[in-house]
Amino acid sequence: MKCNEIHNHILFFVEKQLKAEQLQAVELHLQTCSACRQLAEEISQTLDLIHLEKNNSSDDVFFEELMLQQNEKRVQSASTLFLAKSQKTLEVLKIAAVISFGIFMGVLIGNKLQSNQTDFAQSETEFVQELFNNTDLAYESVEEYLAENN
Ligand SMILES: [Zn+2]
């Protein structure tokens, strides 16, 4: 696997949700690639922090929390996802309310909101893909490191 492919699997790897075949490929890559190893380590630490804060969260809420923390620009689609699919906890509703207020304010001050609304996640797959994209953004320094060394 190349680094880019590793990045697409690394979150599942850290969460120990890879199939045996993919798990083996990722582990093999991490043995030889310090940049990806560091990325996995940083993700793992971030997840640990979130798990500590949200001990009783389900995976769904946990992923959405991560999404919110990683990239505020994606908050709008995350809020739509919240409303459509979870409404599991009061906290989620509170977050959604804050986000909705933010969107409302955005409309008020004439933000180009419409262009932001066109890329709402259409499916679980796209949602997960967005999550990966967010992860990449959050670890931009690692990305730059990879670009320089490959
Ligand atoms: Zn790598």
Image (cartoon, rainbow, N blue to C red):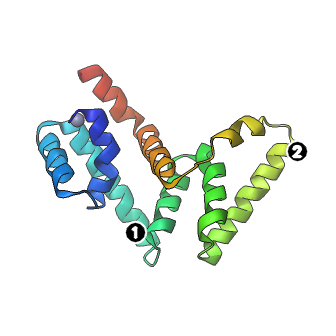
Binning the other alpha carbons within 10 Å of mark 2 as few (below 14), some (14 to 19) or many (20 upward) gives: few
Marks 1 & 2, CB-CB < 8 Å contact: no
Task: Pick out the residue farthest to the front.
Answer: 123
Above or below, comparing residue 32 to residue 150 in the picture? below
At 19% from the left edge and 46% from the top edge, which residue is drawn?
26
In the rendered view of the protein, which quadrant contains the N terminus?
A: top left
At 69% from the left edge and 69% from the top edge, which residue is drawn?
94
8 relative to 86 in the view: left or right: left
111 relative to 123 in the view: left or right: right
Q: Mark 2 belongs to which amino acid?
A: Leu
146 relative to 113 in the view: left or right: left
Q: CA distance from mark 1 to mark 2?
A: 36 Å
The mark found on residue 51 in the picture is 1
Q: How many marks?
A: 2
Q: Quadrant of residue 14?
A: bottom left
Binning the other alpha carbons within 10 Å of mark 1 as few (below 14), some (14 to 19) or many (20 upward) gives: some
84 relative to 34 in the view: left or right: right
The mark found on residue 108 in the picture is 2
Q: Secondary structure at mark 2?
A: helix
- Counting from the top left corner in percent of width and height, residue 91 is at 62, 73
Q: For ligand 1, which image quadrant applies?
A: top left
Q: Mark 1 belongs to which amino acid?
A: His
Q: Quadrant of residue 95?
A: bottom right
At 63% from the left edge and 41% from the top edge, which residue is drawn?
119
Circle nearer the N terminus (1, 2): 1
Q: Secondary structure at mark 1?
A: helix
Above or below, comparing residue 83 to residue 104 in the picture? below
- Counting from the top left corner in percent of width and height, residue 81 is at 61, 59
- Counting from the top left corner in percent of width and height, residue 53 is at 46, 70
Residue closest to the eye, 23 or 43: 23
